[in-house]
């Protein structure tokens, strides 16, 4: 049985000991699909890593509570305040009275545009900080690519699992749980596209300075990388993904879709609708 056959959207799946990805998928025509994942570490003090998207709130909460009792959740590591990561924070806090939010000062301010996060339930975690969660000590680190200034990745030395947040984002031809299910071309094209989509300034970077940042991230020694917008990376794909990341400053920026593209898509949709009626 391959991973493809067992992969199901919103069905948590184990990626390492007591570590689960909650996968979701967003269709993104004409570029295929984007994963929209979150993660759970079910150690002695269970940790939710991000809180999923509001668009699938009920299903996401059901999926998470199928692997951890909300009363047992002790920590919510919020990588940043973007909606695909913080979208279900308040329902999570309501369901998990024993949980503390690991976040940043700036994230709290940014979320205050929409809701008030109970500050007495928060702890600030900055780049390089460690968090003792009972049976393991997690490491927070700013990842090399991000689309929000508050972003912190999370490394679990107990399992060598790295949550890379928005780094290693990729589009996919179809929903996919493990990156090994992707061919070489789709893997490379997806990494280069996702990286430039998340961080459209990569062509402005000083390659040497950026490589030092990438090296700091890779020196965590992750054996398994999970992220919000990537299938799980492991084996040779880990080093290959870091190599592609190193090369991003040398790649031309991605040219965004234009109004002409949108007009074309709308015309095609109208034509399809008309032929459906005929
Ligand atoms: Fe983000
Ligand atoms: Fe994201």
Image (cartoon, rainbow, N blue to C red):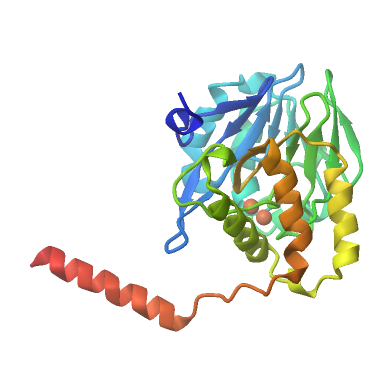
Quadrant of the frame with the N terminus: top left
Residue 15 seen in render: yes
Q: Quadrant of residue 246?
A: bottom right
Q: In this image, 186 relative to 156: left or right?
A: left
Q: Residue at x 90, y 35 (%)?
A: 130
List x then y, in percent, for residue 58: 47, 36
Give the vertical position of 172 relative to 274 (above or below). Answer: above
| Residue 100: percent from left, percent from top | 77, 32
At 58% from the left edge and 51% from the top edge, which residue is drawn? 187
Q: Is residue 74 above or below residue 147?
A: above
Which residue is nearer to you in this view: 72 or 245? 245
Along the viewing direction, whichever of 118 and 9 lies nearer the viewer: 9
**Picture quadrant where residue 65 is located:** top right
Front-lying residue, 148 or 175 = 175
Tell which of 52 and 206 is nearer to you.
206
User: Looking at the image, can residue 141 be seen?
Assistant: no
């Amino acid at each position: 049985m391959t991973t493809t056959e067992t992969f199901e959207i919103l069905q948590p799946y184990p990626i390492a000991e007591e570590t689960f990805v909650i996968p979701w998928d967003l269709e993104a025509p004409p570029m295929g699909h984007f994963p929209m994942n979150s993660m759970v570490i079910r150690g002695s003090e269970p940790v939710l890593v991000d809180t999923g998207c509001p668009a699938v709130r009920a299903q996401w909460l059901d999926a998470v509570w199928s692997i951890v009792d909300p009363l047992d959740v002790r920590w919510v590591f919020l990588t940043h305040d973007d909606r695909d990561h913080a979208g279900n924070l308040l329902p999570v806090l309501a369901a998990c009275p024993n949980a503390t939010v690991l976040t940043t000062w700036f994230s709290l301010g940014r979320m205050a545009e929409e809701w008030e996060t109970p500050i007495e339930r928060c702890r600030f975690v900055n780049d390089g900080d460690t968090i003792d969660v009972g049976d393991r000590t997690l490491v927070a680190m700013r990842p090399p690519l991000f689309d929000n200034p508050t972003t912190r990745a999370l490394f679990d030395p107990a399992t060598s699992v790295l949550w890379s947040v928005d780094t290693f984002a990729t589009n996919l031809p179809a929903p996919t749980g493990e990156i090994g299910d992707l061919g070489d071309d789709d893997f490379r094209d997806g990494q280069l596209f996702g990286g430039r989509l998340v961080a459209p300034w990569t062509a402005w970077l000083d390659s040497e300075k950026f490589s030092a940042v990438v090296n700091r991230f890779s020196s965590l020694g992750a054996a398994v990388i999970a992220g919000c917008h990537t299938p799980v990376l492991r084996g040779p794909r880990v080093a290959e993904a870091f190599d592609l990341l190193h090369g991003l400053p040398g790649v031309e920026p991605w040219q965004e879709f234009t109004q002409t593209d949108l007009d074309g898509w709308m015309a095609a949709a109208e034509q399809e609708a008309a032929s459906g009626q005929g």
